[in-house]
Image (spheres, coloured by chain):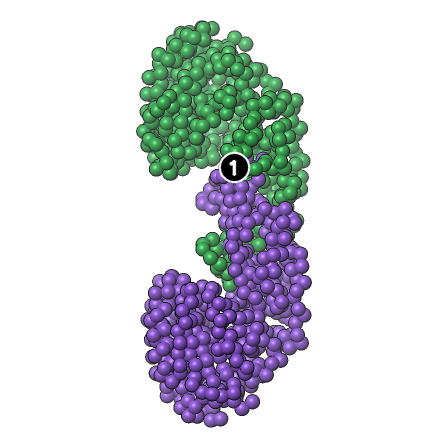
Chain colours: A green, B purple
Amino acid sequence: MVLLKDLEKFAEKNLDNALEDLFKLTRIPTVTAKGGEYSSEAITELNRIFRDLDFETLTTETKGEPVFTSTSKTDKPKTLLFYDHYDVQPAEPFDQWTSPPFEPEIREGMIYGRGVADNKGNIIARVYAIKMIQELHGELPVNVKFIIEGEEEVSSPNLKEYVDSHHDFLFSDQTSCIWEFGGTNTLGMQEIWGGVKGICYVQLKTTGPNRDLHSAYGSIVENPANHLVAALASLRNDQTDKIQIENFYNPIITPSKEVLEAILKIKDTMDEEKQKEQLGIKKFIGDLHGEELLKKYYLNPTCTICGIWSGWQGEGGKTVLPAEAHAKLDFRLVPNQTPEDVIQMLRDHFKKNNFNVEIEWFDGYRPAFTPLSVPFVGLLKETMLEVYGHTPIIHPWSPASGPLYLFADHIPVLSIGVAHVGSRGHAPNENIKVEDFKQGQVCLARLMEKMAET
Amino acid sequence: MVLLKDLEKFAEKNLDNALEDLFKLTRIPTVTAKGGEYSSEAITELNRIFRDLDFETLTTETKGEPVFTSTSKTDKPKTLLFYDHYDVQPAEPFDQWTSPPFEPEIREGMIYGRGVADNKGNIIARVYAIKMIQELHGELPVNVKFIIEGEEEVSSPNLKEYVDSHHDFLFSDQTSCIWEFGGTNTLGMQEIWGGVKGICYVQLKTTGPNRDLHSAYGSIVENPANHLVAALASLRNDQTDKIQIENFYNPIITPSKEVLEAILKIKDTMDEEKQKEQLGIKKFIGDLHGEELLKKYYLNPTCTICGIWSGWQGEGGKTVLPAEAHAKLDFRLVPNQTPEDVIQMLRDHFKKNNFNVEIEWFDGYRPAFTPLSVPFVGLLKETMLEVYGHTPIIHPWSPASGPLYLFADHIPVLSIGVAHVGSRGHAPNENIKVEDFKQGQVCLARLMEKMAET
């Protein structure tokens, strides 16, 4: 291993090049949600970047945007796999950006631009970590692979098909994976994410008369808005926050000792009062605090109305009995729940309780996590302690969701990155700190060194 | 009394004049909902029309649009009061009109134009009934008064204040009132409306975090959409359609024998299958039929969600925990319920059940009805039997609402008019039949004659 300060020097020396590559990639407005017209330009740029590392590159077409993969030409016993994405969230509203979203710039030590945090900054930091190791060691001590998809921000509709047909490439015996997101918390402490909650997202619809009626009919014509509200209310006890769908909690596994210990450690870094103030709320659900609050946050599934609409929403008192009503609902799932099971339970619940509710469409991911007892967790923790001078916070999984199960079913997957708590991913003025961008490279370089040693 | 056929001849002879007056009034686009810029033009026209009858006229300013009143110069023991309004509903969508809404025209025996049914056709039919009696008898056998307001289509916000300060003018000892709406049913039978249900319209709001949050927070941050849905669901049992607000049903009085008899007679004119087909529903609430269905329609109060909105309503699966949620709700009230009581019960219900729901605003009318045993009902029934050749259907009250209580608290009020079941009030191609317009005049003329005799 080289000295840490030599890694840091290298990152400093190469900063301008790394920033130039990040800027070039950020200037390509790869907003897949608006159509993938910039995907090929991004892939041309990725080809240039990875060929410059002397990596092999491959573009695989899918039913949507292409998947870009790249592989080092090494033949080592261990492999480090990076999952990233070249697409970004839409940048609207443009007028809330201080500098234009696709013209990245640096102000006071921060890099601003759509995608710098999520997740083009990570792609380039990972590339420069490899460059660093190649130049200081002559060659990589582990094989490195990248899979960079173009549909993460639109729920990765074609990733499963890609992964299913590329198992051998992705999941060789001694592969570990670094996922696409991560950074520091409110105290500036590094965070490792051990996985994600699952999600089951459904759109529901109820129908009534063939047109909006005068509400004078209310006593004899069933109102689809009243009916939908009753059906939704039946799913969850509002006072206890218990989900009342039969068997909903049954598959859930008891959390491991390591998960509970990790949650306890997170507790010490939490400022509940500050968080409530930031969220504009007086109390958390059930007025929970400390360990109980965090346990609920990480270990409980949810049933959230993300949207609901029916009838008259304008000014004044239009007296209408609406023809239909709609709701969007998401369930965040914890280990052992699956979206398929939840949909079936939901259908059963509606049927059993005489709710005539149509499931218009649904979508979802299983929850996925890497057991905190696996060696890769310890290795990453050690590496971060050395590079950043403090033990990182380990989240057993994120309360958010993603297609991580496609990988975590086969290999250890942990997520770290170069963002920070104020990075504003998905929002105007998305940013990362130049310092985090450099240190992220050092951390990954050291991780590759340490992987080879164990 | 003159012969019925002489009345009919007179209506035929004067038809062109009556139509001309109706067309003149209809051409004035008195859409108060869009601002009252045409009120003064309408009042100028009303002044011309009523001075032509040798009536006294008076325009009274209010906080909104002026109230127009007019009085015959007679001094008879009995008085007939007409309540009408010169404002109309907005005419949008314009492209669904066959002829422009404010350029009335006759096609195949029907008069088309915004307001011809609701309720300018009634104003002119009432005027020409008076003209008929004046010319055939020399003078009116009863005093006649009109009150014509300009804010009926926007919930009559200033009518109460007007009525409260004009009791002497409106409610002298032997006054009876004809209200503004009415016509024929699906079988072409004349209908008399004995009153209206009341209404309590409320807009509700729940609030959560200070912005839309990522729904990953769902397990610890209370969701105002879930909370509003639970609060709304608690108001009504969806399976039994019982409203679950404490004491809600307690003030309701038992319907009179006459009311129950009237409902039984309506039953004989109902075609349930046809009505369900027209409404696009498979069954009425509780799969009720016949008498039970009609009893529920007339005698039950309602709790109808007229609108609800929160969070994401666009395409796809945005995972958001909304900052706030809203609903519009109307209660149709039956005799002895009041909007003020309902609002208090609603506040108590939310408080008692730990629902943190804000009542943003509310509005309403008390229910009002004229007992079917009063002589004015019999007189009108007899008159209509004579003029139309069949006994009219008597509705104890309309399941819709209006400011009728302001009058029915003091004098008998019944509603009849010249519309028909396909008149499309409030909709494009609003129309009345020329034949109904003429016969309506005859009916009212005969009513005045008969009033004087009893």
Specify the subunit that label 1 lies on. A
Depth check, front residue: A309 or A342 = A309
Q: Quadrant of residue A109?
A: top left
> The C terminus of chain A is located in which quarter?
top right
Residue B252 in which image quadrant: bottom right
Can see residue A158? no
Residue displayed at 35% across by 20% down: A19
Residue A77 lies left or right of residue B65; in this view the side is right
The picture places residue B326, in percent across and down from the top left corner, at 51, 49
Height in image: B187 above or below A290?
Answer: below
Tally of numbered tags: 1
Frontmost residue, B388 versus A164: B388
* Neighbour tally class for label 1: few under 14, some 14-19, many 20 plus, Cα within 10 Å: some
Image quadrant in which you'd find residue B345 = bottom right
On the image, the x and y values in percent for residue A349 come to: 64, 46
The kind of secondary structure element at disc 1 is: loop
Rendered residue at 47%/93% (across/down): B2
Above-or-below relation of B79 to B290: below
Residue A138: percent from the left, percent from the top? 40, 7
Q: Is residue B254 left or right of residue A131?
A: right
> Can residue A84 be seen from the camera position used here?
yes
- Kind of residue at disc 1: Gly
Mark 1, residue position:
A280
- Check the image and report above or below for B245 versus A366: below
**Whether residue A212 is situated above or below residue A412 in the rendered picture:** below
Comparing B59 with A316, the one in front is B59
Residue shown at 32%/29% (left/top)?
Answer: A103
Which residue is drawn at the image coordinates 49% and 28% (left, top)? A163
Q: Nearer the viewer, residue B220 or B316?
A: B220
Residue B224: image x %, image y %?
55, 44
